[in-house]
Every structure is written in structure tokens, then in C-alpha cells.
Image (cartoon, rainbow, N blue to C red):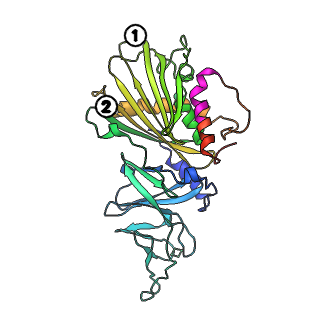
Amino acid sequence: MIQTTDRHASSATESSTNGKGKDPVLWNDWHVVAKGVDLQPGTLMKFRLLDTDLVVWRGEDGQVHVWADRCPHRSVRLSNGKVEGNTLVCSYHGMVYNPEGQCIKVPAHPSYPPPKQACVRTFQVRERYNLVYVCLGEPEKDVVAFPEWDESTYRCYLTGPYFIQSNGYRAIENFLDVAHFPFIHGGILGDLDKPEIEDYEVVINEAGVFAKDIRVWQPDPYGTGVGDYVIYDYWAFRPLTAYLRKYSPNGDCLTLLYNVTPISEEECVAWMSGSLNYAHSISDEEVQAFQDKIVLQDLNNLESHFPKKLPLNAPLEFHVPSDRSTLMYRKWLKQLGITYGIL
Ligand code: FES
Ligand code: FE
């Protein structure tokens, strides 16, 4: 796994707790902030989402909380504190906050009732598919479903977090793009001798963007040493949540849910939830190593975009027919009125 927590944490310490990017579409959406297994009862971690510093903690009762990383007493980081039972204790003057974010104890004045405004800003949380999701605003929809997670015919896995010095939409576009396979993932997902991409269909509907029946030549899709075409279907369900299904005539099917969390307009963290209805004998470590390798191959280009922001309103880039999926994605983002991370 590419572990990126340190790079991420150092950037978080410099940030503000007041999100500057209150784009309502992103503000009211769900974003992954942690893997459930990385957050054991009694532990906390810090995270930065949409330029907003957060403390993510799990009480001894198993409940996860995501709060603004700021003690309302003297504005220090709550992430410097500690979890005690089902409360969070600030490191500075030891004030104790209950799961609702309300201060319930002032150690310097044991008989003093904490004022009502002694309350931390809290956010809504969901825990699904071993991922912790937070919404900074009012969620308009549920988190994007990954139904394979609970199906016994699929072998499921989770990889990441992958810290990427890239705008989140650029990361989603990279996920939707098959034309780079021969050049970046040659010998694995594509073949330099067969870089052609046939026309395919893309639509925008109430679920988002849907690109269908994209045929890609792969050198060894079935592990037999013989190349063949595989089919990809792609969905962008949310501006920063996409999903793909790759399948073959022999019935092999792979799906990937790609959650991209915007730290800022130019940095993101990606998480991949995958499922396979084959390769049940391959170890988890091998599956994870394969996914890490593919992500690593993409990093150099992903981190080199200039400008980093997505040029939705600036005529800076040219397009070819195989860009149809990303073009429709851009059209959809425009329809949604997205402004954060956009040029
Ligand atoms: Fe947190 Fe005083 S700043 S208890
Ligand atoms: Fe790639």
C-alpha cells in the first residue's frame, strides 16, 4: 500500500478550520476521510477536507465522530487531545466533550456548568464498506452504493489512501480515461501495438454520467498469455465518486468504486474499493500490490497537470473522440454548477 498519512498530516497542520470552498455540491456530498480499520476504538486522527481541518475519532462504544478540529475554548487543535471512553478531551485545559460535541467538564472549575456555546462543530458520519464518510453540509443523497461488498460471489478489497497532489476531478478523469492505458499501463491494461479506441456511447442521466461498452485490448486479460478485448462500463455518480465494471465474454467481472476526497482544490486522497468474481486464490497482498502499482504508474502525470484546476471555463485543452467520457463529465460538472477546483 502507498501510505501517505505523513504527507497529508503535515499539510493539515497549516490549514484553517473554516472551509473556504463552500461549493454546495461538494459541501452537501459524502467524502471518505478514513478506513474503518485504521480507526480503532479510543483513537483519533486528523484530516483535511475542502480546506477544513477535522478531527476523526472513535469512542470506546465503536461510534465514529467527525468534528471541526478546533476547541471552542482557546481555538487549539482538538486532534492534540485524546479519546477517553466516549468523550474527547482537549489537550490544553482538559475540557471534556461528549459525543454530541458539548463540553461537559471544566477541570479548573469542577462545579461550574459549562456554557451552552461550549460546543464543538460536529458533522454527519456514515460508516460503510469499511470506509468512514463525512458530509460537511446537509446530505442530499446517501453514500454511493457498492453492492458487491456484501455478495459472497465477489472477492472484495479496499486499497488506499493514495495521496495525490492533484485536483480531484483530474483524478476522476484519469479513472474514466482508457486511452492512456497502453502508454502508462503498457503490458498490463493496454498494449502499445493496439492503442486505438473505437467510438463508444456516453450519456448524462439522473444518476450522473454513464459511458458504456468501451472496448480495450489487453495483453493478458485472463492470465493465459493471450491478448483479447475486454469491455469497460463507467459511471460518474457524483463529482468525485466514480465506478467501473470491466467484464469479459468468459464471465470474469471486476468492479471498482473510486472515492476521491478533495483536501483542497489541488490535492486529493483516493480510495479504491474493488471486487472480483474470479481470482479467489490470489492473496490479498497480491491484489493490493497490483492496485498500488497501477495507481503509482498514474501519479507522475496526475501530479503534473498545469493548470492543476480543471479548465471548465477556459479553452486551454483540445479534445479527440476518445475523450468523450471526460468531455461529458465536464459538461455534467458545468450543469451541476461546480465552482470549487474549477478554472
Ligand atoms: Fe481546549 Fe482550553 S483550549 S480546553
Ligand atoms: Fe491509469
Residue matched to label 1:
226
Check disc 2: other Cα within 10 Å, few if <14, some if 14-19, many if 20+: few
Report if residue 197 lies within the magenta region: no
Which of the image's four quarters has the C terminus? Answer: top right
Rendered-image quadrant of the N terminus = top left
Q: On the picture, is 298 further left or further right than 82? A: right
The residue shown at (52%, 44%) is: 269
Q: Is residue 270 at least partly visible in the picture?
A: yes
**Residue 306 - label:** none
Residue farthest to the front, as pictured: 206
**Residue farthest toward the left in the current orientation of the protein:** 152
Whichever of labels 2 and 1 marks the residue nearer the N terminus, that label is 1
Residue 177 position in % (x across, y down): 55, 27
Q: Quadrant of residue 166?
A: top right
Residue 127 to residue 88: above or below: above
Which of 312/301 is in front? 312
* Label 2: element kind: loop
Name which quarter of the figure residue 323 lies in: top right
Question: Left or right: where does residue 328 sit relative to residue 140?
Answer: right
Badge 2 is on which residue? 283
Q: Main secondary structure of the magenta part?
A: helix
Total labels: the figure holds: 2
Q: Is residue 110 left or right of residue 334?
A: left
Which kind of residue does numbered mark 2 sit on?
Ser
- Residue, x 59% and y 26% (percent of image)? 324
Horizontal and vertical percent position of residue 217: 48, 15
Is residue 156 or residue 141 the one in the foreground?
A: 141
In the displayed structure, 315 sits above or below 218; it is: below
Q: Label 2 vs label 1: CA separation? A: 23 Å
Q: Which residues are magenta?
A: 320-329
The amino acid pointed to by label 1 is Val
